[in-house]
């Protein structure tokens, strides 16, 4: 597709500003998609080859999530998505900050793709004496019971057609699974038909 649109600009649309810009925008979008896919393949390959080494440190999980949400401003301003973060405290955890950031990004991207028509995503940080639980919830159609155990598999695609394909490559949840397993974090998914899905992970204090 990239090659075809590049040839179209070269041979046909280079004199028509509107068509040329549309073709070039398509090329840029396809390059971004290909770049994301390559990066995800590399991330998963490293994780599955057991070459992934955790660089653990103490960091502020609340601050990290709030920073991540700011990076989705384009979704709130142009696509009318709403990201609702529920937490009251600065919560410190000991983990690999960069990899937990990747987990949160992938779970939010997944929620963006599957949330309902209200385009709302909830991010909850729940604390108790012994643990910190991070939940990322969409308001979409939910996951069939026979698919729940399959969604963590790389390249698995739902039988349903309610995915927006806004972001992601199909590898996000497989990467999430591997990173959380390396941290020995409990993780899972709870889904209710036509009421939404919650992905979560738990950090033991």
Image (cartoon, rainbow, N blue to C red):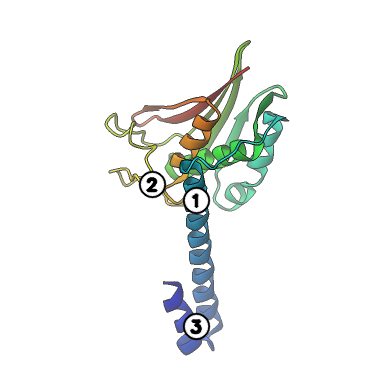
For mark 1, does the 10 Å Cα neighbourhood hold few (<14), some (14 to 19), or many (20 or more) residues? some
Q: Is residue 117 visible?
A: no
The reply to whether dot 3 and dot 1 touch (C-beta < 8 Å) is no
Q: Nearer the viewer, residue 128 or 82?
A: 128
Q: Is residue 3 left or right of residue 75?
A: left
**Residue under numbered circle 1:** 40
For mark 3, does the 10 Å Cα neighbourhood hold few (<14), some (14 to 19), or many (20 or more) residues? some
Which dot marks residue 163? 2
Marks 1/2: CA distance? 19 Å
Q: Nearer the viewer, residue 86 or 59?
A: 59
User: Picture coordinates of residue 177 (x, y %)?
Assistant: 46, 35
User: Picture coordinates of residue 101 (x, y %)?
Assistant: 61, 39
Viewer-nearest of labels 3 and 1? 1
SS of the residue under disc 3: helix
In the image, what residue occupies the spot 44% across and 77% down? 3
**Residue under numbered circle 3:** 9
């Amino acid at each position: 597709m990239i090659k075809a649109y590049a040839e179209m600009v070269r041979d046909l649309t280079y004199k028509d500003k509107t068509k040329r810009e549309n073709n070039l925008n398509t090329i840029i979008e396809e390059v971004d998609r290909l770049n994301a896919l390559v990066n995800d393949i590399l991330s998963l390959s490293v994780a599955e080859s057991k070459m992934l080494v955790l660089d653990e440190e103490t960091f502020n999980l609340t601050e990290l999530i709030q920073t991540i949400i700011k990076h989705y401003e384009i979704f709130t301003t142009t696509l009318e998505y709403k990201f609702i973060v529920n937490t009251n405290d600065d919560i410190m955890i000991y983990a690999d900050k960069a990899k937990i950031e990747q987990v949160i990004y992938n779970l939010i991207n997944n929620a963006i793709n599957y949330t309902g028509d209200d385009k709302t995503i909830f991010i909850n940080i729940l604390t108790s004496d012994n643990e910190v639980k991070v939940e990322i919830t969409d308001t979409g159609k939910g996951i069939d019971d026979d698919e729940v155990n399959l969604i963590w598999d790389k390249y698995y695609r739902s039988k349903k057609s309610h995915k927006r394909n806004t972001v992601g490559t199909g590898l996000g949840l497989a990467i999430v699974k591997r990173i959380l397993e390396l941290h020995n974090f409990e993780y899972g998914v709870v889904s209710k038909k036509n009421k939404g899905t919650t992905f979560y992970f738990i950090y033991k204090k």
